[in-house]
Every structure is written in structure tokens, then in C-alpha cells.
Amino acid sequence: MSATESNEELFALADSLIETATGGEQIEVYISRGSSTEVRVHNGEVEHFVSAMSSGIGIRVINDGRTGSAHAGTLDAGIASAVLAEARENVSFSSVDEWAALAEPDAVDITKQDLWSDELERYPTSDKVELAQRLERMTLDLDCRIRVDDTNFVDGGGEGLVVTTTGIRRYGRSNSCYLSVSTLADDTDGTRTGFGFAVGAHPGEFDVERAAREGVDRATRLLGAIKPTSRSTTVVLDPFVTAQLLGIIGSTLSGDAVVRGRSLFADRVGESIAASTFTLVDDPTDPRAYTATDLDGEGLAARRNVLIDEGELKGFVHSSYSARRAGAATTGNAIRGGYAGSPSAGCLALQLVPGKRAQLDLIASIDDGVLIEGVSGLHSGVNTVSGDFSVGATGMSIRNGALAEPVREFTIASTIQRLLNDIVEVGGDLEWLPMRASGSSLVIRDVMVSGSS
């Protein structure tokens, strides 16, 4: 079935449900249909393989400030009608919420993007397996000290639409894929771990050799690691670590967090909250982003939102609900966990405006510091209400402008507020990762490193 035919079929189902609305009733129909593949290889053999197809419908009904919802994992018209009836029944069990309402069209045009790869759609399953096996062989051949824990090929794609009684009628489809390797290197007092990724619109864009090399380098560079001396020093965050940090920062800029009093940046719009070198945008319209999209979870056009501009907080990301509560306008940032989920406000594709210099050039200008290549306990070690920040880390010492001995079993501590204000420079090494944030090297001064006395 072509995309156009599929589009028409799904709209026909949604329209048949929307047309039953009565009185002041608002109805939203969210439909999704897709497929995914997961291949895990170990020692040249397929250890895990899943190829799945899924489809489902989620319906929300809002009446007099009360919301009822229901869903089902099928697109059968008869069952869809039963789902609508259940959602209507559930309205009576909910409490009144003065801000409850569906999103309305906001006249923002969709940014046209090429989010669907026919090449990925046609890519044979046997070739997906072979790619994972090739990455494993290539990684092992690079260094005899390396063991491979596993290699993975993952893809997913689908189509979906949102139709509402308020006038939203949108359809989209996309697919994506990545290849990864997890590596191990044995040391006298334990095992060091590493990883490598290859990301692309389709497997033909994968840089398999780079993924293998990164997997080897990240594990072997930590052999012989020691605890660093405790001190306040300059740290350089690896792009992958920066991406993880941006995810935490992004959660504090969610409209839902703001209206619920769970954001440390509430009421600070227009203030300087970071160094002038720091500009953070949420841009799902950049097709290079792994989570690029043309629509948000409510069917509104996804758009580029500048959150922090040269250190100044410009605003938060909003769904229609959080926007109503905050007295603001939606930013096209509703996210939802598939047809069974309800929309909430969240960042879609975070990225920093990159600087000019590569990581090694940044390191060359540092007399004493630490390159942070991995962190642990990030979510449990960061309080997004107070901003307190303390996580375990591994990496490399920096001495006289060059990488020195590997270091491990230490913590880095600060607050999110101070980290942002102590940023010295953003690297030019923007990396696209299979997550909701890209990464760049980040130089931060005066971070407390706690290792040996």
C-alpha cells in the first residue's frame, strides 16, 4: 500500500469517530502504525532478534473540563468505536481541570523534511544481521585486548495521524536506524567498558569503521586508570556526556515542570542563566537530528525554539496544556509515548550552537584538567529542582595541553546553575547521536573533582 493510500485509510477511520461528537464534546483521535527491527550479535552469532509490527489507536474525550481516554492495539473499526465509547465513559470518572482542552491550529506551517528512507524500508534483514556481524569483526580486529559484549542493529519506522474536533488534521511518517557496539577491556583490577555508534538515515550512511574505532578507543584508553587528585579544575565534557547533560537541562525547561513548580529556572525568562558562549535550541526541523520530526504529539507543526540565547533564558517548551496553564502559547512541543500515552511538554531534538574548535584544540589550551568521557548515576545524581549535581565519572587527565593518564572512580560536583555559568567554550565537534540531544565538547571551569586526597 502506498503512503497516500495508507494516509486515506487512516483518515477515514479517524473521521468516522470525530463525526460522532455531540454538544460541547471535544474528541482527539491519535493513530499510529509501524514496524521495528532489533538485532543483537555476540561471537558472530545472532543472540537476539525481534522484528515486530504494531498499530493502535488512542482517543481522548474532553467535556466540561473532564478528560477521558482509552486505547487499543488494533485499527479495527468496530473496536475503535468501542474505544471511543470507553473514553466517553471515563470522562465521568475524572476530576474537573480548568485547563483541560485539545490543541487548536496555530497557523504555524510545517517545515518540509525528508524523514522517510525507502532504502531503509527495503533493506534486507539478512544485511542488517551482516552489518552487526561486520562491526563486531572489525572491532575485534583493531585491538587484541578488546572483547565485544554485543553489537546491535536497531531500526524503526511508522506513520501516524492526529485528527481533532478543534480542526487539527495532520499525518506524518518517518523511519530511522543506528548501529552500536559495546566493548570490554580487562585490567588488573577490573574491566573497562566502551561503546561506539553509527547513525544515518539509512545503513548506507553508516561509518562502521569509526564506530569500531570509537568502541576500541573508549575501552582501551581507560586501562591502567587511577583516581585523580581531588581539586577544583577545568573539565571537558565528551559530546556524549554533553548530550546526556542537555537532556537533564531540557527537562528543567519543560512547561510542565514550570507550571508544577518543578523547574529551577521558573520566573527567570529574560535573565542570564549561562555563559554567553552557550546557545541551546530545540530543533526537530533539523533533519540531521535522530529525533527530527515535522509534527509534535498533538499534530501541531514542530518548530525551532531557541531556549537559551548567548546565556539568556528565552523561554520554555510548551504543549497546548502547559501553555494554557502558563498563560503562554504552545511551542509545538507535545510529546507522547505512542497511541497509549497522553501528550505532555518536552524537548524534541536539543542541540547546542557549536563553536569553532575541535576537542583536541580545546584540550591544548588547558594546563590542568580532566576530560570526562563517561558518567554514571546522572539521573539520580542531579536534582532538577535545586540544581545540585554530583555524579560518578571516568576519563583522562589533561596536563600541559595534552591527554595524560586515564582516571576513574571519582565524582564531579557542582550545580546546574553554576555549570552553565562556568562554561568557557563550546566545541565545534557537533555529533548526532541516537537520542533526543546531539552533543558537542564542552569546557567548564572550576568543577570539583573528588578522587584521592
Image: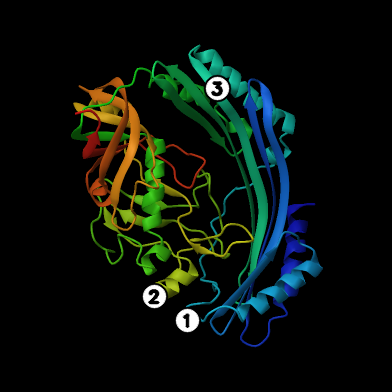
- Density class for disc 3 (Cα within 10 Å; few <14, some 14-19, many ≥20) is many
Quadrant of res 187: top left
Q: Outermost residue, bottom direction?
A: 23
Instruction: Give the side of residue 236 with respect to residue 105, left or right.
Output: left
How far from the left and from the top, in percent, is residue 316? 38, 62
Q: CA distance from mark 1 to mark 2?
A: 13 Å
**Sequence-first tag of 3 and 2:** 3
What's the residue at 50%, 17% (across, down)? 146
Amino acid carrying label 1: it is Glu
Q: CA distance from mark 3 to mark 2?
A: 52 Å
Does 100 sit above or below residue 446?
Answer: below
What's the residue at 72%, 76% (across, down)? 85
How far from the left and from the top, in percent, is residue 125? 73, 33
Amino acid carrying label 2: it is Gly
Circles 1 and 2, Cβ within 8 Å, touching? The answer is no
- Could you say which disc has been placed on residue 327 in the image? 2
